[in-house]
Image (cartoon, rainbow, N blue to C red):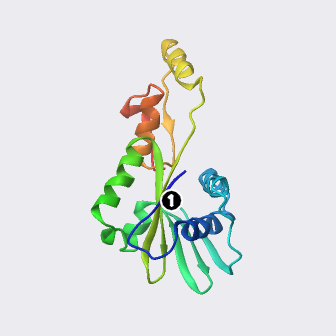
C-alpha cells in the first residue's frame, strides 16, 4: 500500500489512513482488504467513529457518513464526477498516474468541506508462475484475454508483466 496525504490537508497521515481503513473495512472487495491490512501494517488502528450510510458505488468506490461528514473513497472517475479531481495539484495527479502506470490501482479519499485529502495505490501481487503459464498457453495456441475491473493503466502494467499484449487486456469492466 502506498498512501500519501494530498491537497494541503491539516490532518495527519495516520488520521487520514485510519479514516480510509474505516470506510474500506465493511467492503468485501480485495482492494478494501489490502487497504485495511496496509493500515494495520503501519500500526494504524481503525478509529471508533460513527459510520453511517456506507454505500458501494459500482465502478467508482464507496461513500459513507462519518461523524456527520460525507466521506468518499474511490477511483479517479468518482472524483471527476464529484468535481473534486480538478482541484488536485498537478504534481499529485502525476504521482498517482505513475503509480497506475506501474501496475497499481489508485484511488483517493475526500472529506466533506476539505476536498481530496489522501491518495493511495494498491498493487496486485502477481504469482511467480503466472508469466510462465501465460507463455506456455500461448505456445499451445491458446488465446489469452485478461478481464479486470481495474483501471486501464493498472491493467496494462500487470498485463505487460505477464506477457500479454495491449489488445489482450480488457479493463474497467
Q: Tell me the residue at 68%/63% (across/down).
A: 25
Who's the residue at 48% across and 32% down the image?
A: 145
Q: Is residue 66 above or below residue 5?
A: below
User: How many marks can you see?
Assistant: 1
Q: Is residue 152 visible?
A: no
- The outermost residue toward the left is 90
Left or right, residue 26 beside residue 156: right
Farthest residue to the bottom: give it. 68
- Identify the image quadrant of residue 159: top left
In the image, residue 3 above or below residue 46: above
70 vs 25, left or right, is left
Residue that extends furthest to the top in the rendered view of this protein: 140
Q: Callout 1: few (<14), some (14-19), or many (20+) C-alpha neighbours within 10 Å? A: some
Is 19 positioned to the left or the right of 86 in the image?
right
Residue 108 image point, x, y percent: 46, 63
Residue at image x 62%, y 51%? 34
Looking at the picture, how far across and down is residue 141, in whole percent?
A: 49, 15
Q: Position of residue 39 (x, y in %)?
A: 63, 58
Nearest the viewer among 138 and 92 is 92
Toward the viewer: 74 or 3? 3
Up/down of 2 relative to 8, above or below: above
What is the quadrant of residue 54 in the picture?
A: bottom right
Asked whether 30 or 55 is in front, the reply is: 30
Is 22 positioned to the left or the right of 134 in the image? right
Which element carries disc 1, helix, strand or loop? loop
What residue is drawn where x is 39% and y is 54%?
Answer: 96
To which residue does mark 1 refer?
59
Give above or below for 38 relative to 73: above
Can the viewer see residue 24 in this picture? yes
Q: Nearer the viewer, residue 121 or 59?
A: 121
Amino acid at each position: 500500500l502506498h498512501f500519501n496525504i494530498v491537497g494541503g490537508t491539516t490532518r495527519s497521515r495516520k488520521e487520514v489512513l485510519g479514516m480510509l481503513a474505516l470506510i474500506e473495512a465493511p467492503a468485501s472487495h480485495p482492494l478494501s482488504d489490502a487497504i485495511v491490512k496496509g493500515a494495520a501494517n503501519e500500526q494504524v488502528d481503525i478509529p471508533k467513529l460513527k459510520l453511517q450510510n456506507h454505500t458501494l458505488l459500482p465502478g467508482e468506490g464507496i461513500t459513507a457518513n462519518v461523524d456527520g461528514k460525507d466521506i468518499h473513497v474511490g477511483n479517479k472517475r468518482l472524483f471527476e464526477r464529484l468535481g473534486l479531481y480538478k482541484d488536485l495539484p498537478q504534481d499529485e495527479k502525476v504521482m498517482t498516474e505513475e503509480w497506475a502506470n506501474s501496475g497499481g490501482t489508485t484511488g483517493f479519499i475526500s472529506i466533506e468541506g476539505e476536498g481530496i485529502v489522501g491518495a493511495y495505490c494498491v498493487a496486485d501481487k502477481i504469482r511467480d508462475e503466472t508469466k510462465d503459464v501465460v507463455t506456455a498457453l500461448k505456445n499451445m495456441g491458446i488465446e489469452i484475454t485478461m478481464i479486470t475491473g481495474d483501471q486501464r493503466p493498472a491493467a496494462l502494467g500487470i498485463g505487460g508483466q505477464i506477457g500479454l499484449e495491449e489488445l489482450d487486456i480488457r479493463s474497467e469492466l
